[in-house]
Amino acid sequence: MSVNSRRNKIIGPALSTGLLLSPMKNYETLKATGAVRIIDRHSSFFAIDFEQDNPEAGILLIDGGVHKEGKELKIHLAKRGLGLGAVRAFALTHGGHFDHKGVLHVLPSSVRTIMGEGDIAAIRGLRNSEGLIPGVIDRARGLIKRPPMGVVKRLVPEIARDRQEFRFGELALTALAVPGHTSGSMGYLVRRGGVDQPTDFFPGDSFDFNRKGRIRDAAGIFTGDRALSVVSKNNIAAVVTEMNLIYGEIAPSHSGLGRYDELIEIAAV
């Protein structure tokens, strides 16, 4: 295991705890989908087999971490005797912030890439990232004049629309628009099987959970439109209630897992 990998096992959970968030756990597995959290520095992303216990059928990634070399993903795949070719689909919760799109630089061009339309300009380096801190970082790096690597500039993603469903083997992925953190922020409901099966939700940075398991709004200094982000969270709460989502877990990018009860409680107010 690399020094970076060992460091990431400490930094990610420690940072989330320091911010009073429910701590992330490296390689924790969600019961409903079998999604595996992979911590990459301060961020995390998720790997989900198309078919349970058969990774050779394909792997779906929800986000892609910080490293452009995909170091943490490669470590995870190598432990399973796999290479990057096993990844067949990649769903971005938001491409406008660097800590979610790292592996785009190393994934095969054949990988299906799904994202919200509002973040395409940012991911291609045609405008700065939204939010105070991401914008400052971009201006400091000069990304508005120096777009990302060619593989990202040439990217032709599939645009995710609100409530649109995608199928990957046994997996059903439903995109939910959650603009606010960035213009194109998306959340993804993922289940294995029919509509009556337990469903996990991946909201990206739209919200997270504190140490008591309560929902916390997206951090303002990283968010493009805080008011819209709150509206999106409330809309998601209504969708969860409408769909009667009870079984499964909610897995934000920067905190530990939470329960649907918290969203249902918001919708009831």
Image (tube, rainbow, N blue to C red):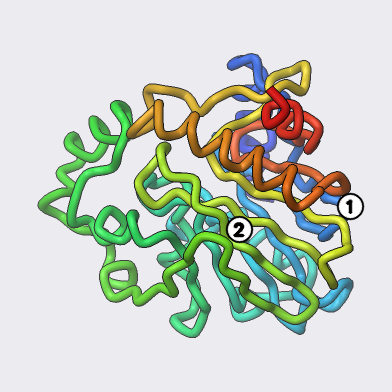
What secondary structure is found at the residue carrying circle 1? loop
Q: Residues within 10 Å of mark 2 (few under 14, many from 20)?
A: many
Residue type, label 1: Lys
- Front-most of 235 and 156? 235
Residue type, label 2: Ile
Q: Residue 31, position in %: x, y?
A: 89, 52
Q: Residue at x 50, y 39 (%)?
A: 232
Which disc is residue 31 wearing?
1
**Residues at circles 2 and 1 in contact by the CB criterion of under 8 Å:** no
Question: In this rendering, does residue 41 appear at all?
Answer: no
Quarter occupied by residue 105? bottom left
Q: Residue at x 69, y 78 (%)?
A: 168
Q: Residue 76, position in %: x, y?
A: 71, 60
Which disc is residue 62 wearing?
2
- Front-most of 5 and 250? 250
30 horizontally vs 152: left or right: right
